[in-house]
Amino acid sequence: MRNILTHRFNRALLLLLLLGNVGQLVLAQGITIAKVKYEGGGDWYANKTALPNLIDFCNNNLNTNLALEEEVVDVGSPDLFLYPYVYMTGHGNIVLTGDEAENLRKYLISGGFLHVDDNYGLDEFIRLEMKKVFPELEFVELPINHPIYNQKYNFPKGLPKIHEHDGQAAQGFGLVYEGRMVCFYSYESDLGNGWEDQRIHNDPEEVRRQALRMGANIIAFAFTQAE
């Protein structure tokens, strides 16, 4: 579990620096976030411009100092522990081996944070695979007054709806381990598409702004929620 002590130090430092105002959040130099690579045929590599745009938005609006480009990390790699926040997306199948599920579990219970973002068609697969990671846990829908919706930006109706998909309401789910949310699952929203360059999906600017603000809330929550 490489670098987990550094990660815990950074989390403690962030809590001290928060001072009651997420707008003043300052991250330690060199913090990098990563996109998770997985097997099974799903397009884990989707939304290539999404995380760089979210990073830029956070650096400009939360005063974070995130590395400008995300890394890519295999879900079963020990390098997973180098990143305090990792992002998983795609449209299709995800398959985790037993070793990969165990690695992800150790990462999450050691202080890491996973954001799973349904890019359409992910739901049936991610629920099954996360059961390998936490067989004792269920995804729970987060209430609209949950802190993740009330960081710098307030979302009084909960997770914003970015793309139509099946026309269902956007929902935010969490996996909570020993009182700490280790995984946030954004379903029927497609935040990542909203983070992408405007030319890719031609989303209205207000829709993109909502997606980026919600993404910033997730980043802020991941780095500052109490252990």
Image: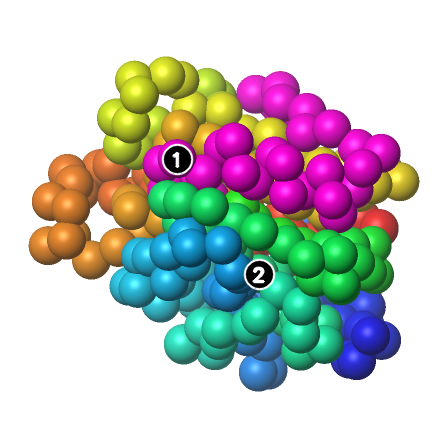
Q: Which mark is residue 86?
A: 2
Q: Nearer the viewer, residue 140 or 43?
A: 43
Magenta run includes residue 121: yes
- The reply, left or right, for residue 70 in relation to residue 110 is left
Q: Nearer the viewer, residue 151 or 181?
A: 181
Q: Residue at x 82, y 75 (%)?
A: 1
Q: Is residue 75 left or right of residue 36?
A: right
Q: Does residue 80 appear in the picture of this structure?
A: yes
Q: What amino acid is found at the position of numbered circle 2 in the picture?
A: Val
**Which residues lie in the magenta part?**
117-145
Q: Which residue is mark 1?
A: 121
**Considering only order in the chain, which callout, 1 or 2, is on the residue closer to the N terminus?**
2
The quarter of the picture where residue 107 lies is: bottom right
Foreground pick, 142 / 156: 142
| Left or right position of 88 against 199 | right
Is residue 209 inside the magenta stretch? no
